[in-house]
Image (tube, rainbow, N blue to C red):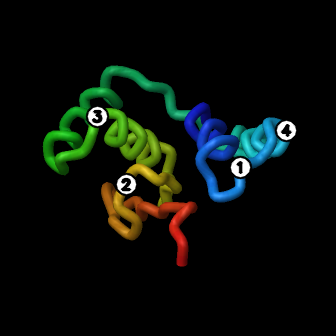
Amino acid sequence: MQELYVTLTRKGRRPVTASEALANLDEIAKFPVVVTDYDLIRAAIELSSAHKLSFWDSLVIVAASRSGARRLYTEDLQHGRTILGIQIVNPFRVQ
């Protein structure tokens, strides 16, 4: 959520105010939380090695998978790629 806040307020084509970003975060906070534990870290390391991804990106993907997500919105991974059954979508991609 911290990365989303920074992206919304600084990186988008039209950065939003802190209040607007907070409203978005309030909506996202309604979704399930996955706690980072050793099993999650180990799975992320294995995914990182197998797919040549950064550890941090792998950690997000594994957490998303464990939460039951089918889609991951991120600007950091290849748009359209599917990893662990999760479709990667870049929300800032120009159509």
The percent position of residue 75, horizontal first and vertical second, equals 47, 53
C-alpha separation, residue under disc 4 versus residue under disc 1: 12 Å
Query: Which residue occupies the foreground of this view, 50 or 66?
Result: 50
| Amino acid on which disc 2 is placed | Leu
Decide if residue 43 is on the left or right side of residue 63.
left
**Picture quarter with the N terminus:** top right
Badge 2 element = loop
Image quadrant assignment for residue 28: top right
How many residues crowd mark 1 within 10 Å: few (<14), some (14–19), many (20+)? some
Q: Earlier in the sequence, mark 1 or mark 2?
A: 1
Q: Kindly identify the residue that appears in the image at 40 percent across and 59 percent down.
A: 86
At mark 3, the secondary structure is helix
- Give the position of the C terminus as an image quadrant: bottom right
User: Which numbered disc flags the more N-terminal residue, 1 or 3?
Assistant: 1
Name which residue type carries label 4: Ser
The circle on residue 19 is 4
Q: Are marks 4 and 3 in contact (CB under 8 Å)?
A: no
Mark in the foreground, 1 or 3: 1
Amino acid tagged 1: Pro
Q: Is residue 39 above or below residue 58?
A: above
Mark 1–mark 3 Cα distance, whole angstroms, equals 28 Å
- Tell which of 64 and 78 is nearer to you: 78
Write down the residue under mark 3: 55
